Image (cartoon, grey):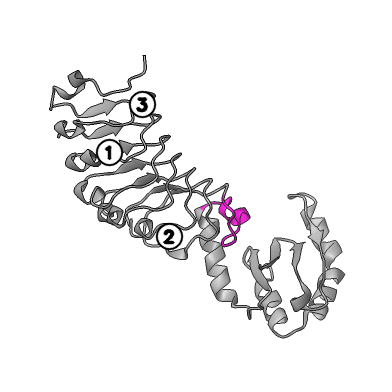
Amino acid sequence: MRLRVLPPTVLRDPRVESLNLDRNKLKHVPGISKLSRLRKLILSKNEIADFPEEIQSLVHLEKLELNQNQIRVIPEGIFSCLPRLKHLRLNNNRLSALPKDLATCSSSLQYLNLSNNLFRAVPQAVLELVSLQELYVQNNALRQLPRELFEGRPLKMFKANGNPLREPPNEVCAGGIQQILSYFSQLENCQVEEDRRVKTMFLGASLAGKSTICKSLKQSKIQAMLEERRANLTHFIDNLESREESEFYVDQWDRLKEMERCTLTVGLLIVHTYGTV
């Protein structure tokens, strides 16, 4: 039988350190603050719409799971009372923002799951979590991931698939944290002059020719560059036959301003040009 209310017997022993109430029909958990020694609280897969504010009294809490509920808002003042929180699951709710005081868990929080919510941007509080090791933000409405998210913290696991990402693109994010860092590094080093209608991204291994293409674009020598690449195409194809299947798509190479989208794969070099709206 699934619980609809919290049984009084659950609250009788204040020495309880772990409580699992998942897969019930709870909407509220009144009296949960009586379990002042709780270190682990699982309330996932219930019908909770209002974040239980009594949780702020659980100062020893290390693991909190409220995933797969109906929570829209988390009030300020909760996380500032949870200095030992290490693990937080809020995925599969209806959240579009996080309280600023989540940042007070900066020295303790290591795991955060925000997937399957309504976030349009990475909350500022998340950027201040310098101890974060795992972050999950899949299936939101994120268009951009800030570079600082991947710097200054021991992040080991990151997933962001299912978002309409434009920077970095989903193809880059699928490669993992190191690929994302490489993207930002190469983007900074390239510094292509920005056109109002296009954005150009250069990706590839060392010595693959990214800098040459970048300089050629800046100096308006696109045609000469392409002719040289085409002359050597047979050589590159020979090298690619034993690797992943290569692609060679070209829309308009006459002028950079006329490009909307093109992909050129030569050896390990990949150039993506995305039209911006």
Mark seen at residue 52: 1
Residue 67: x %, y % from top left: 40, 36
Q: Are marks 3 and 1 in contact (CB under 8 Å)?
A: no
| Magenta stretch, residue numbers | 163-176
Q: Which residue matches tag 3?
A: 22
- Residue 22, x across and y down, in percent: 36, 26
For discs 2 and 3, the disc positioned in front in the rendered view: 3
Instruction: Judge whether 126 appears above or below 72 on screen.
Output: below
- Which residue is pictured at 76% across the width and 71% down the height? 259
Q: Is residue 160 magenta?
A: no
Question: Can you tell which quarter of the image residue 179 is in?
Answer: bottom right
Q: Amino acid at mark 2?
A: Leu
Q: Secondary structure at mark 3?
A: loop
The answer to whether residue 195 is left or right of residue 29 is right
**Which quadrant of the rendered structure holds the N terminus?**
top left
Q: Which residue is at the far bottom? A: 219
Provide the residue designation for mark 2. 149
Residue 59, visible in the rendered structure: no
Q: Is residue 160 above or below residue 217?
A: above
In-front residue for pair 130/93 = 93
